[in-house]
Structure formats: structure tokens, C-alpha cells
Image (tube, rainbow, N blue to C red):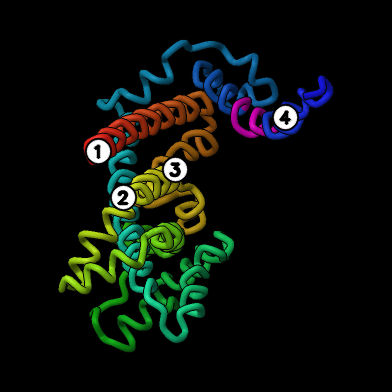
Amino acid sequence: MKPRYRLLPYLLLLPALVMELLIHIVPMAVGIIMSFKQLTQFFIRDWTAAPWTALNNYRIAVDFSAPIGQSLLNSFWVTCSFTLFAVAFSWLLGVAAAIFMQEPFWGRGVLRAVFLVPYALPVYAAVITWSFMFQRDTGLLNHVLHDQLHLVAEKPFWLIGDNSFIALVVVSVWKTWPFAFLTVMAGLQNVPRELYEAAAMDGATVWQQIREITMPALRPVNQVLVLVLFLWTFNDFNTPYILFGKSAPEAADLISIHIYQSSFVTWNFGSGSAMSVLLLLFLLVVTGIYLVVTARWRDADA
């Protein structure tokens, strides 16, 4: 290779590296530095002049006997519950729909396109539409449940109180399951049709074919899919922010909104940055454990 071409791969990678630094690495490093400072509204003009507090912001965040720590812990458990339900239902719907669409039938292409509409819609337009539908007096949901079907005696509130958690899970699943559907559908393309034909000749039922052929073949896809859904859902900020605004109900107080409130509502950016770093560490630990466990499963199956 000529010397002038040896640098070509590095030059082609340079724009991506610069963008990665500007978009991810540098803001992350600044956030970590801010977490060690007493950065309040008095130092907004020059955040570098804020006094250092060492680990004080972290101590306050994890002091679960104090109000700040208690509210952060409550937000953490709400986020865990929300993530569990949202990921489980999204994955289940995506897998079921992909398996259902595996066999060709009339209108399958149209149905596939309809299934992908929630994934293609802009997040703000989709969630704000759900917000209108969840309105107590004028929303479509209460109109159907109360006025048309008479399933409830009184129109419930969906955007405040305990029902806000259900509303949040519904919107998240509606927004996320098409990605699971698309991913699993792509994975099913690699499953040889001959396996199903041989199983059918041996008398295997449809459920047995799904259990013995489809699900084992989809295991590598599902391992990546569940991890991606977990990270997206646990970090989700747009859905609760658009649905509830700056002040989410306690039942739907996700940790992303909680950190936002700690930073931009109380103007304590040092404390909010410390919570963000703790969230990052938690996600790194969970991701590492998940990758180790799934790698051992792969080795055991090999």
C-alpha cells in the first residue's frame, strides 16, 4: 500500500470520532466534573467557579433516610417497575406479531406497514396525541369506557394519581413494540423453512414448532433486543415529559424526570449530575452482568 493511502482509513474515521467526542464523551466528562461541585443558580454564568464538594452530592443522593434520598429511591423503584412492564409487553407483542406475520397471507405487507407506524411517527406528535386521549373530560379513552361501554361508574383520571403509571406503560409499549416486531421479524428470516417442514411431517403442532424451533433460533436476537429495550426504556425521558410535563405524578416519577427536576427545577445541577452518574453506573453494572450471564448461556448451549 502506498504511504499516502495508509492514513485514508483514519481520515475516514476522523469525522465520526470528532462527533462522538462532541456529542457523548465531552458532555459526559463535564457532567462528571459538575457532580463534584456545588453548582447552583448562583454559578450559572461561570460554572467553573462553583466550589468543589468532593462526594457530598453523592452522599446526599444515597442518604435514603433524608427526603432527597427517599424521593430518589422511590423514583428508582418506579422506574424499575415501569421498565419491567414496558419491556415485557413490548417484547411479547413484538414476538407474537412477528411469528404471526411469518406465514404469507393476503394483505401481509399492508399489515406490516401499519404495525410500524408507531415507530415511524415523531415521538412528540405520538405522545401528545395520547395525552389528549387520556384527558378525563374530553379524552377518547374515557368517552369509550364511560359513555359508550359503561365499564366505569365515573370517568377516571389518567394523567394524575396511580393511573398515571398505567398510562405511561401503555404509551411506552405502543411506541416501542414495533421495534421489537421489526427486529424479531428480521431474525426470523434466518430460520430455515426446512426445519418447519420436517417438524410438520413428524407431527409437531404449531406451538411445538414455536417452542422447539423458533424461540431457540431467536435466542441471540432476543438477547440483544431485550438489552436494547431495557436501556431505552430505563432512560426514557421524552415519553413522561411530554405526557405529564415538568412535574410527573409520584406514581410515574421516572428517574429521568426526577433528575431533570433536581437539575432544572431546583437549580441544583451538582446534585442532578451526581444522580446522573449514579444512573450511568447502575446501567453499566446491569449491562455487564447481563452480558456475562448471556455469554455463559451461549457457551452452555454450544
Q: Residue at x 69, y 34 (%)?
A: 16
Principal SS element in the magenta part?
helix
Mark 1 residue type: Trp
Whether residue 171 is visible: no
Question: Of label 4 and label 3, which has the lower sequence position?
Answer: 4
Calculate the distance from the C-alpha at mark 1 to the C-alpha at mark 4. Answer: 36 Å
Q: Nearer the viewer, mark 2 or mark 3?
A: 2
Calculate the distance from the C-alpha at mark 4 to the C-alpha at mark 3. Answer: 34 Å
- Residue 22 part of the magenta segment: yes
Q: Are marks 4 and 3 in contact (CB under 8 Å)?
A: no
Mark 4 residue type: Pro
Q: How many marks?
A: 4
Calculate the distance from the C-alpha at mark 1 to the C-alpha at mark 2. Answer: 10 Å
Q: Give me the disc on residue 9.
A: 4
Magenta stretch in the rendered image: 18-26
Question: Of label 1 and label 4, which has the lower sequence position?
Answer: 4
Q: Are marks 2 and 3 in contact (CB under 8 Å)?
A: no
Q: Residue at x 32, y 24 (%)?
A: 62
